[in-house]
Image (cartoon, rainbow, N blue to C red):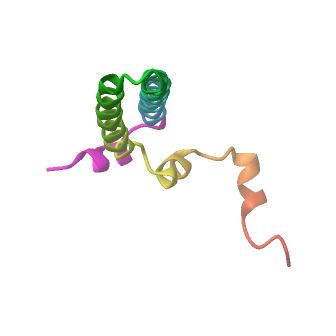
Amino acid sequence: MSDFREAQNQAHPNKTSTLMLGIIMLLIGNMSIQIWLLYSALNNALDENSGLAVAAFIFSLILFLVNVWLLKFLPNAAVLHNKLPLPEKDVNKYKGDRYK
């Protein structure tokens, strides 16, 4: 039985790129929420309302753990580069040692 990483390595490059875009957008959204929570927590902490600051910290910690978990699903860079075919006219340009 294959796992997610093996299936991802065998996927078409367009599907891999779409998956990577979706995960990156989720990460950006979660980080934006974390920045907003930081701003809100700091404002409330300055007003000596520490209850909201603690709640914001806990929710931000949960979002951080979700972001770390999402990083596991990003494809390997080697997988993306190995699947992209070079055009036929450029294939010979990259063969051999060009610094001889």
Residue 42 in the image: x percent, y percent?
A: 48, 27
Magenta residues?
Answer: 1-13
Which image quarter: residue 41? top left
Residue 39 falls within the magenta-colored stretch:
no
Residue 27 percent across, percent down from the top left = 44, 32
User: What's the magenta bit mostly, secondary-structure-wise?
Assistant: helix
Q: Residue at x 51, y 46 (%)?
A: 80
* Quadrant position of residue 18: top left
Q: Residue furthest right?
A: 100
Who's the residue at 45% across and 24% down the image?
A: 29
> Looking at the picture, does residue 76 appear above or below residue 41?
below
* Residue 5 within the magenta-colored segment of the rendering: yes
Q: How many marks?
A: 0
Residue furthest front as drawn: 48
- Residue at 71 percent across and 54 percent down: it is 91
Q: How far across and how far down the image is residue 98, in percent?
A: 82, 70
Q: Quadrant of the C terminus?
A: bottom right
Location of residue 33 with respect to 19 vertically, above or below: above
Viewer-side residue, 98 vs 26: 26
Q: Residue furthest left?
A: 1
Q: Is residue 66 left or right of residue 21?
A: left
The residue lying at 44 percent from left, 29 percent from top is: 34
Residue 8, x across and y down, in percent: 34, 43
Given residues 23 and 46, the one toward you in this image is: 46
Q: Is residue 41 left or right of residue 77?
A: left
Q: Can you tell which quarter of the image residue 68 is in? A: top left
